[in-house]
Amino acid sequence: MKFITFSGPPSSGKTSVILKVIASLKNDNDRFGVVKFDCLTTYDDILYNKAGVEVLVGLSGNLCPDHFYISNINECIKYAIDKHLDVLISESAGLCNRCSPHIKDILAVCVIDSLSGINTPKKIGPMLKFADIIVITKGDIVSQAEREVFTFMVKETNPNAKILYVNGLTGQGAYELSMCLKETNDIETLEGRKLRFTMPSALCSYCLGETMIGNDYQTGNVKKMSFNEKKNSNSIINNITMANNNDALVENNNVIIKTISILGGHDKNGCKEEVNLTINSGEIICIVGSTGSGKSRLLEDIECIASGDTPTGRIVKIFGENLYSGKLVAQLSQNMNFVMDVTVKEFIKIHAKSRRVKGIDEVTKKIIYHANALAGEKFDECTSVTALSGGQSRALMIADTAFLSTSPIVLIDEIENAGVDRSKALKLLVKEGKIVFVSTHDPILALLGDKRLVIKNGAINKVITTSEKEKENLKIIKRFDNKMLEIRNSLRYGELIDWNMEKYFT
């Protein structure tokens, strides 16, 4: 039987990830079991039962959950073997971030979510530092820069771990994780094996039921604070340690992509998607289709380099150099949020330091300048990122992606809804050698691309190469668009729209 340990902070998405992994593996007709460890209560067993997974629940109550876990886990293995299970997964919440459920020579997975803040990896103990695989969840709802900084902080904390990105709602990325689980060795018992790290220290008077506060009542294993000790700064910027103002190192071995191939999967009805598309470096690909047709799903398939493990069944293949030396995809999504409570200047510097770029001050000024050129209402370097409007946030991330992201693929989801100068934004993003995918309803953006993919019922229905006639028509559409921009600006500045509109447009 295969045995894998899963751990992570509460609400990081462990159960969702485990369920998606099991769903990816169920085609092998294996029998799966989960033993869920918690303190007071859990409802996750309902989800496991609903998915047809054998589940055990262990509640530690007033005992340390770590000690409870390790004193019961071998019996859980015996129970699973008696039940003829093929795979057993233990799930434990690191309630104190000091928990250490990982066992030597047993595959160890830690699940952590991007919304917890970029300093969180530094605050988590053995369950992250000694994990073989670190799964990052909820990355689709934070900014591109924060995803990159968060990943860097994880790598600093555990440089030897394999990092995977899994969406617990869609299952995106679960297939790759399931393949890692499939390669683990079978075991029959944990007898004689060792933990990767020691358990939290015990035993003190409070462990034995003491409730009175005061030194007279504290006996056993007691640790006291030192109030004279000088503390290190806990600022977010100081926690990114490898950059020193403008003397940071340049990241070597940049990823170079020559082509991307998209092999069709199936539409929403299960019908085959008749597509075998090759996209070359430097091309702009626009994705068009009705609302709900599957444009964003195609972007997600490209982002996770789908291997037939997403709802569409598509396969994305990438050919180039140094493909494993950095993140391949930068994404500007509609649902982007900032969770870091820092100024614009601090935000850019944090990202720049994590990317190991030179001339941080110069890059910071450049990004703010170009972001303000895209946004309607200007902002300064001291503005908090959480105080930016939706349009200002997107403008900042467009400029940030253009100048800081080394990812050779850029995904843009409906940039016309961002309240920014979309043509100017696209020109800023199209750097030499990058492949840009734009999901859009806007005819100007659609015709700016080299090709456009028409999505219908969840599948690529047509691939159209932009013709010369369409490029000529684009010039006319732009003239009308500029007139609409003048009207929008007039409204913003409180002017009356009382001129001869028919003559204005003709």
Image (cartoon, rainbow, N blue to C red):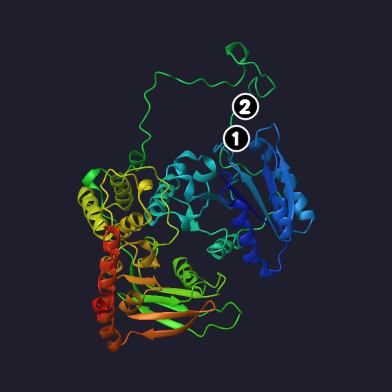
70 up-or-down from 312: above or below:
above
Q: Amino acid at mark 1?
A: Met
Asked which secondary structure carries label 1, the reply is: loop
| Residue 295 in the image, given as x and y percentages of width and height | 47, 72
Crowd class of label 1 (few under 14; some 14 to 19; many from 20; radius 10 Å) = some
Residue that protrudes farthest toward the top in the picture: 216
Q: Residue at x 68, y 44 (%)?
A: 37
Tell me if I can see residue 190 in this picture.
no
Residue in the foreground of this view, choosing between 374 and 242: 374
Q: Residues within 10 Å of mark 2 (few under 14, many from 20)?
A: few
Q: Which residue is mark 1?
A: 199
Quarter occupied by residue 16:
bottom right
Q: Quadrant of the N terminus?
A: bottom right
Query: Looking at the image, do the residues carrying marks 1 and 2 touch, with CB atoms under 8 Å apart?
Result: yes
- Residue at (44%, 74%) from the top-left corner? 317
Q: Is residue 233 above or below residue 350?
A: above
Return the residue at label 2: 202
> Foreground: 329 or 387?
387
Q: Mark 2 is on which residue type?
A: Ala
From the viewer's perspective, tell me whether residue 81 is left or right of residue 300: right
Q: Is residue 460 left or right of residue 321?
A: right
